[in-house]
Image (cartoon, rainbow, N blue to C red):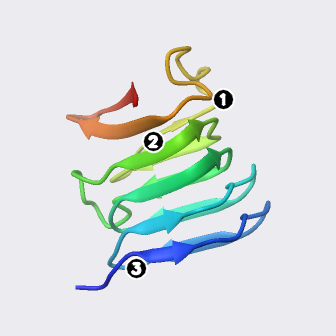
Amino acid sequence: PLGALIIDKPLRSGQQVYAKGRDLVVLAMVNAGAEVISDGHVHVYATLRGKAIAGARGDEQARIFTSSLEAELISIAGTYRTSGDAPLPADVAGKAAQISLQGDKLVMQAL
């Protein structure tokens, strides 16, 4: 198995990183308009303002972790939510959070 793909520089609008067959760890901000995609888990140890897609190949056990949730889009195994659908819940917006898939619903929990 491959180890996690680690990105240590901020991702700007228009940039995309795909961790094929492994987890993705981002140690810097994911700006609005940037995309982080992983077949496994997505970890963002900074502000997540762009798009985060975990379980891109259908892994329903994949999760998204971030130290500050402000995402435009979050998706796990094809189930997604955009910031245009509804604002993030107050208990997780701008806070450390994890997102998991339970059934057909994305569940956001503050950490």
Q: Circle 2 sits on which residue?
A: 80
Foreground pick, 42 / 20 = 42
Instruction: Residue 98: give x, y in percent of width and height.
Output: 39, 38
- The numbered dot on residue 25 is none
* Vertical arrangement, residue 23 with respect to residue 105, above or below: below
Residue at 45% of width from left, 34% of height from top? 97
> With 74 as the anchor, is 35 left or right in this view?
right
Residue farthest toward the top in the current orientation of the protein? 90
Q: In which quarter of the view is residue 16 placed?
A: bottom right
Q: In the structure shown, which secondary structural element does the residue marked by tag 1 occupy?
A: loop
Q: Circle 1 sits on which residue?
A: 84
Instruction: Residue 62: give x, y in percent of width and height.
Output: 29, 54
> With 75 as the anchor, is 33 left or right in this view?
right
Residue at 62% of width from left, 20% of height from top? 87
Q: In the structure shown, which secondary structural element does the residue marked by tag 3 occupy?
A: loop
Q: In the structure shown, which secondary structural element does the residue marked by tag 2 occupy?
A: strand
- Identify residue type, mark 1: Gly
Badge 3: residue crowd in 10 Å (few <14, some 14–19, many ≥20): some
Mark positioned earlier in the residue sequence (3 or 1): 3
- Identify residue type, mark 2: Tyr
